[in-house]
Image (cartoon, grey):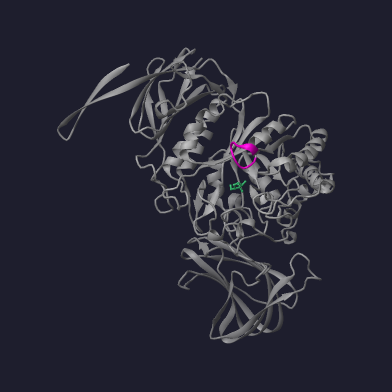
């Protein structure tokens, strides 16, 4: 059906032929339930996502345990002199061998040390900060001042510690700030003459997520919570594997007393020479207990991924000998006990001692990250055998390798169809064109094998061949088109997550990422808004949406899917117009008695495909919401060029 739309632009009569397209949504014909885990999040400590990001500790290398023990630290002095020595007492203290020994001669001015955090310390004005340090004065008379300073060195918060004793003791003070700083510093300066030992220096904002001491950055967790994610995958990603086995993620070393969590180099420290981060380490202040707690806080099912005896196949390809895999399988069993076991069990007790006697309700477990080839299948088999026997209640996730097709991918699927993983984790870091082209990828997938977990995906589009991809509107639009295909195939694709999740603007290794932040602020990308619009409009069941009797998956650059929420009796239609022209849809809703009087319409669009949000311009690509009157059982939807439109309306079945 065609109509003639006429409009006058600067005195010239433009006659446009505009197609009106007819769509039918069969509201009373639920095709398949949408899993509660359909839209989730993938967390990996990459781009300073944990230390320097989500984990709110502001002091870098707080215990002088980085291989270069003064990393992050500098001498601080004013009319005073002294020296700093790093002392190692490895036999006495296995987990924390080093401390700073400071000789002070500053009767008039001061002498001490200064920490510059993670590319500076972010300090908010009029906020409280909690400082603590382990110290012992070994000689003389000294007083200690704690100062927060801005980049110019102006003091914007201070406090002091007196009565220092000769025994190791933890001192805590809080500071209130009078100004903010993006790249501030923490000074610990001493006045007098004497010697002092310092260790475990810590500075946290008082305001953390749920005000937990030693907790997580409030603004970042809020952004995650706002996504209403169905699951939280952790701790990655390649970080699970390590560059070699010694560098792999070992969850047992990340739980229990923080003081006993051993520092480990972050593999992204050295991965990309062009984005080297020599100061990137894992303190595990955000460890497995905290990941489980975070999952619970934001209502997401926990999805830990464990190492299956394989280091990164892009790096060393080191594998554990088959006859030495038992401890790795045991780690998986113990993890289930840690998450779900009774408080009388060894690992359940540890969970209770850490503050969570009740179960974390673990139901999903990934065996290996992005592994491939025979060496993976043979190791996976061993895990599956034990885990399925001992824990049939836990759903297992196996990996299809690093690409969405090709020999490794086909081999993985062929082998896994002979085994019993519940999900196959597919990864796609591809061009926007790939995402548009693949909106119908799952329409014809074999339904007899395991379910699909679209575990890592992001559209990478390079503005120039050499440039790194950004979170452009084009990339987000392509993902939205693809996600209508995931939703339409919700019987098969039951989990999905964009990756990676977080990136520090001054310390990233991988781009694009869902959320960007600096030391004070965070910005949601267009991709984030797409994820959110799908997630918060998840519905309970997919219903047929037909254009000329077929799904709409790329015809004339148009994509669509529809769900209903059986509990709230709401219909949600998601429409992507990737074309350059506006489009009008006449949507006929069948199988219902009536519709609500108005629909809520969320729109995300931009004419500039390469536009992206920044910390200073956060809303260049941002959803808008409006209300649209509805008459009868039809909706007319006007889609802007290059837009995602989500229409929500109540119905009477
Ligand atoms: O998301 C970044 C990396 O991409 C992950 O660590 C890895 O699994 C994939 O190769």
Q: Along the line of sight, which residue is nearer the eye, 237 or 300?
A: 237
Q: Is residue 164 left or right of residue 151?
A: right
Q: Is residue 430 left or right of residue 356?
A: left
Q: Along the line of sight, which residue is nearer the eye, 263 or 198?
A: 263
Q: Which range of residues does the magenta coloring cover? A: 401-407
Q: Residue furthest left?
A: 11
Which percent across, then down, holds residue 88?
A: 74, 74
Q: Quadrant of residue 268?
A: bottom right
Residue 405 among magenta residues: yes
Residue 573 in view of the camera: no
Q: Is residue 644 left or right of residue 261?
A: left
Which percent across, then down, holds residue 56?
A: 59, 57
Residue 18 among magenta residues: no
Residue 451 in view of the camera: yes
Q: Is residue 146 above or below residue 215?
A: below
Q: Is residue 203 left or right of residue 24?
A: right
- Please tell me which residue is depicted at 55% across the width and 61% down the height of the picture: 128
């Amino acid at each position: 059906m065609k109509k003639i739309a006429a409009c006058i632009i600067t005195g010239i009569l433009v006659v446009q032929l505009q197609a009106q397209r007819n769509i039918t949504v069969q509201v009373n014909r639920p095709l398949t339930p949408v899993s509660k885990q359909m839209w989730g999040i993938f967390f990996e400590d990459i781009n300073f996502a944990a230390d320097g990001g989500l984990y709110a500790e502001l002091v870098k290398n707080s215990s002088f345990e980085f291989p270069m023990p003064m990393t992050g630290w500098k001498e601080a002095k004013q009319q005073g002199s002294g020296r700093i020595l790093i002392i190692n007492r490895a036999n006495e203290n296995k987990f924390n061998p080093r401390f700073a020994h400071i000789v002070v001669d500053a009767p008039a001015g001061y002498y001490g040390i200064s920490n510059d955090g993670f590319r500076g310390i972010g300090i908010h004005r009029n906020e409280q900060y909690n400082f603590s340090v382990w110290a012992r004065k070994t000689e003389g008379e000294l007083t200690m001042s704690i100062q927060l300073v801005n980049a110019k060195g102006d003091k914007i918060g201070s406090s002091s510690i007196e009565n220092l004793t000769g025994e190791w003791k933890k001192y805590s003070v809080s500071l209130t700030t009078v100004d903010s700083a993006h790249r501030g510093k923490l000074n610990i300066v001493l006045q007098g003459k004497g010697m002092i030992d310092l260790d475990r220096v810590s500075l946290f904002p008082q305001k953390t997520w749920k005000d937990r001491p030693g907790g997580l950055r409030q603004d970042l967790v809020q952004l995650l919570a706002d996504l209403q994610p169905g699951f939280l995958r952790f701790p990655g990603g390649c970080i699970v594997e390590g560059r070699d086995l010694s560098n792999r993620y070992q969850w047992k070393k990340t739980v229990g007393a923080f003081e006993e969590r051993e520092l480990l180099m972050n593999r992204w420290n050295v991965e990309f020479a062009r984005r080297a981060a020599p100061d990137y380490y894992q303190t595990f202040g955000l460890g497995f207990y905290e990941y489980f707690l975070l999952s619970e806080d934001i209502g997401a099912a926990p999805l830990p991924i464990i190492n299956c005896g394989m280091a990164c196949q892009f790096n060393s390809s080191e594998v554990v000998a088959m006859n030495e895999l038992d401890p790795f399988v045991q780690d998986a069993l113990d993890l289930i006990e840690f998450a779900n076991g009774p408080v009388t069990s060894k690992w359940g007790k540890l969970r209770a001692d850490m503050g969570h006697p009740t179960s974390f309700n673990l139901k999903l477990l990934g065996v290996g990250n992005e592994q491939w080839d025979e060496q993976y299948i043979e190791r996976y088999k061993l895990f599956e055998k034990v885990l399925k026997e001992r824990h049939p209640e836990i759903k297992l996730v196996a990996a299809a390798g690093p690409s969405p097709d090709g020999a490794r991918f086909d081999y993985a699927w062929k082998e896994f169809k002979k085994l019993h993983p519940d999900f196959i984790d597919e990864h796609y870091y591809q061009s926007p064109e790939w995402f548009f082209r693949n909106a119908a990828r799952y329409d014809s997938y074999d339904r007899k094998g395991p379910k699909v977990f679209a575990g890592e995906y992001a559209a990478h589009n390079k503005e120039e061949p050499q440039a790194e991809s950004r979170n452009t509107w084009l990339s987000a639009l392509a993902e939205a088109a693809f996600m209508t295909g995931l939703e339409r195939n919700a019987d098969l694709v039951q989990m999905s997550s964009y990756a990676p999740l977080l990136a520090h603007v001054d310390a990233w290794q991988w781009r694009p990422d869902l959320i960007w932040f600096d030391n004070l602020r965070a910005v949601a990308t267009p991709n984030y808004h797409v994820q959110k619009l799908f997630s918060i409009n998840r519905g309970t069941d997919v219903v047929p949406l037909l254009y000329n009797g077929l799904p709409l998956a790329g015809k004339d650059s148009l994509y669509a899917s529809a769900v209903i929420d059986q509990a709230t009796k709401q219909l949600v239609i998601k429409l992507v117009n990737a074309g350059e022209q506006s489009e009008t849809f006449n949507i006929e809703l069948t199988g219902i008695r009536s519709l609500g009087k108005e629909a809520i319409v969320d729109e995300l669009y931009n004419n500039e495909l390469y536009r992206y949000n920044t910390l200073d311009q956060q809303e260049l690509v941002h959803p808008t919401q409006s209300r649209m009157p509805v008459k009868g059982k039809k909706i007319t939807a006007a889609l802007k060029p290059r837009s995602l439109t989500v229409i929500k309306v109540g119905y009477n079945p």
